[in-house]
Image (cartoon, rainbow, N blue to C red):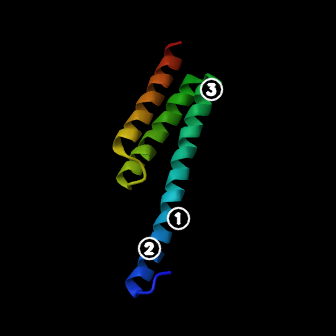
Amino acid sequence: MANSPSARKRIRQAERRTAVNKARRSRIRTYLRKVEEAIASGDAAKATDALRAAQPEIMRGVTKGVLHKNTASRKVSRLSARVKALAAA
């Protein structure tokens, strides 16, 4: 258990930050799931709209420190490739 006031404050800050990051990560996963469901349904227009909504949310995760830049770029790239293939088919 932390004894110094600064260590106690650090614990409080970490708990708050963990809760915020958890909410952000959950929000990003929800957007990703919506894109996945749209792709699975076979609706190209719906998938495109879902990807357009998800992309800024994923990149916001990068600026907030929830995701690494390369991870976010990889996810967006793979999803966009799948949506593009769906639209072409």
Quarter of the figure with residue 75: top left
Question: 40 or 47, which lies in front?
Answer: 40
Residue count near mark 2 (Cα–Cα under 10 Å), binned few <14, some 14–19, many ≥20: few
> Which of labels 3 and 1 is toward the front?
1
Q: Position of residue 45 (x, y in %)?
A: 54, 26
Question: Could you tell me how far apart the alpha carbons at marks 2 and 3 are, in whole angstroms?
Answer: 40 Å
Callout 1, which amino acid?
A: Ala
Q: Is 17 rendered above or below residue 11? A: above
Label 2 belongs to which residue?
A: 13
Residue at (65, 25) in percent of width and height: 41
At mark 3, the secondary structure is helix
* Count of residue discs: 3
At mark 2, the secondary structure is helix
Callout 2, which amino acid?
A: Gln
Residue at (43, 53) in percent of width and height: 66
Q: Position of residue 78 (x, y in %)?
A: 45, 28
The reply to whether callout 2 and callout 3 are in contact (CB within 8 Å) is no
Callout 3, which amino acid?
A: Ala
Residue count near mark 1 (Cα–Cα under 10 Å), binned few <14, some 14–19, many ≥20: few
Residue at (41, 80) in percent of width and height: 7
Question: 33 or 44, which lies in front?
Answer: 33
At mark 1, the secondary structure is helix
Label 3 belongs to which residue?
A: 40
Label 1 belongs to which residue?
A: 19
Residue count near mark 3 (Cα–Cα under 10 Å), binned few <14, some 14–19, many ≥20: few
Q: Is residue 48 left or right of residue 33?
A: left
